[in-house]
């Protein structure tokens, strides 16, 4: 078993092990004296993994209930969060009880948010079941949901008590979502690790090295969130490609490109422009495109520039009339550059 400890005010462990789902109750029992557990999951994940988790929790003395919501980003809204809060009330969870988020990033973000606001905060454990959520969203305590104005506009920083990563769950993940997770993995390589870039580029079969890659990404994110939990500086780097990605997702009403797909497109587009502006080493965009192609990720997007820019006005990295754009200096190195909002349109058109 591999273990990563995320230090800080609410220190927690991330355990990575094939098959850990079957003993999740044992691990969760070590971090809580809760008597009740509410599993929050979606309509795709619960039928596959729900019973394993219920059984293990019951064996470890928890009174278990579950709340299942319709799978997909289109569910990531306040109405679904309200449904979760009602389930917490109906099942009489008290302040020392625990929520178990079983699913991908959509489940984890919303279950974490419901935990953050119910009774002003109760504990939750993350059991991420997509590649994207294992390498990214389950770590760092960002929870929340979308609003009609845009992506992830409401939320709270609320750390989990524990994260259990079972790489076996990737075997049932549809290929599209496995590739989607690769979008965020490519992001880590571009912002922080040329070594990871080369590993991804040279590997023959990603499945052979997936557990190592998950560990590497989680450890990169650990370092970043330990330094800057509330995203005042370095954590913004994790948003490389996200300004355009979030706008595309909202433009398509959260039913088009998936998050990691949109991030891939966003990283490529912004780097094409930053290369032209002399901010990025020449040839970097080509290197990004090569990896996106390798993992069957899209490289183009549709959408009217004016509408996309209007959505970007709600980006969380905006500060008044300026927006903090994340740029890649070269593979493995990134930085934040304040940019005038008024010039965003021409900037993104360049890279399209
Ligand atoms: P998701 O949760 O919608 O999962 C993708 C699809 O896979 C869903 O249909 C789901 O039901 C299905 N699924 C999940 N696990 C499965 C499994 N093991 N077998 C079969 N099917 C399975 O989406 P996601 O890609 O995991 O997460 C995307 C979300 O994460 C976005 O909303 C994004 O904003 C968020 N995110 C958050 C952070 C953060 O720091 N909090 C970071 C990155 C992304
Ligand atoms: N994925 C962005 C963050 O965790 O900050």
Image (cartoon, rainbow, N blue to C red):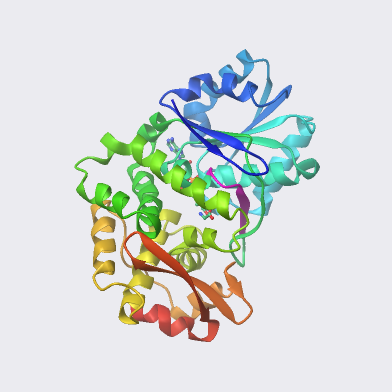
Q: Nearer the viewer, residue 208 or 87?
A: 208
- Please report the residue visible at 40 percent of the width from the left and 26 percent of the height from the top: 18
Point out residue 26 in the picture as x, y percentages from the top left corner: 58, 18
**Residue 34 locus on image (x, y percent):** 73, 24
Q: What count of labels does the image hold? A: 0
- Percent x, y of residue 337: 48, 74
- Taking the spot 43% from the left edge, 64% from the top edge, the residue there is 241
Is residue 285 shown above or below 304? above
Horizontal placement of 120 versus 212: left or right? Answer: right
Name the residue nearer the viewer: 232 or 46: 232
**Residue 347, image quadrant:** bottom left
Dividing the picture into quarters, in which one does residue 209 lie? Answer: top left
Say if residue 173 shows up in the picture.
yes
Residue at the top extreme, as displayed: 59
Residue at 64% of width from left, 79% of height from top? 320
- Residue 352 in sight here: no
Identify which residue, 176 or 283, lies in the foreground: 283
Relative to 143, does residue 150 appear above or below in the rendering?
A: below
Magenta residue span: 138-146
| Quadrant position of the C terminus in the picture | bottom left
Residue at 38%, 35% (x, y): give it.
170
Q: Verify whether residue 142 appears in magenta.
A: yes
- Going by the image, does 154 lie left or right of 167? right
Q: Position of residue 71 (x, y in %)?
A: 52, 43
Q: Quadrant of the N terminus?
A: top left
Is residue 316 rendered magenta in the image? no
């Amino acid at each position: 078993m591999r273990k990563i400890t995320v230090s800080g005010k609410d220190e927690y462990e991330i355990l990575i092990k094939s098959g850990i789902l079957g003993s999740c109750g044992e691990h969760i029992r070590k971090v809580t004296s809760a008597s009740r557990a509410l599993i929050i999951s979606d309509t795709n994940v619960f039928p596959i993994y729900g019973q394993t988790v219920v059984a293990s929790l019951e064996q470890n003395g928890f009174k278990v209930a579950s709340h299942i919501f319709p799978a997909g980003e289109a569910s990531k809204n306040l109405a679904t969060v309200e449904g979760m809060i009602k389930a917490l009330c109906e099942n009489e969870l008290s302040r020392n009880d625990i929520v178990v988020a079983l699913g991908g990033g959509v489940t984890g973000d919303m279950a974490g948010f419901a935990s953050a606001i119910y009774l002003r905060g109760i504990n939750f454990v993350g059991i991420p079941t997509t590649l994207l959520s294992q390498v990214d969203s389950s770590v760092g305590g960002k929870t929340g949901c979308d609003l009609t104005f845009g992506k992830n506009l409401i939320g709270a920083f609320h750390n989990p008590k524990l994260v259990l990563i079972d790489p076996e769950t990737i075997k049932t993940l549809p290929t599209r979502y496995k590739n989607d997770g690769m979008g965020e993995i490519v992001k880590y390589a571009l912002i922080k690790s040329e070594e990871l870039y080369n590993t991804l580029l040279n590997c023959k079969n990603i499945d052979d090295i997936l557990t190592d890659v998950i560990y590497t990404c989680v450890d990169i994110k650990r370092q970043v969130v330990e330094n800057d939990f509330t995203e005042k500086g370095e954590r913004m780097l994790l948003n490389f490609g996200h300004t355009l990605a979030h706008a595309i997702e909202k433009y398509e009403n959260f039913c088009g490109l998936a998050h990691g797909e949109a991030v891939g497109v966003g990283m490529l587009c912004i780097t094409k422009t930053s290369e032209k502006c002399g901010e990025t080493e020449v040839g970097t965009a080509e290197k990004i495109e090569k990896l996106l192609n390798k993992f069957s990720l899209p490289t183009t997007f549709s959408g009217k520039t004016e509408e996309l820019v209007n959505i970007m006005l709600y980006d969380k990295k905006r500060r008044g009339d300026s927006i903090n754009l994340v740029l890649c200096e070269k593979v493995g190195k990134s930085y934040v550059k304040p940019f005038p909002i008024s010039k965003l349109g021409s900037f993104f058109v360049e890279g399209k």
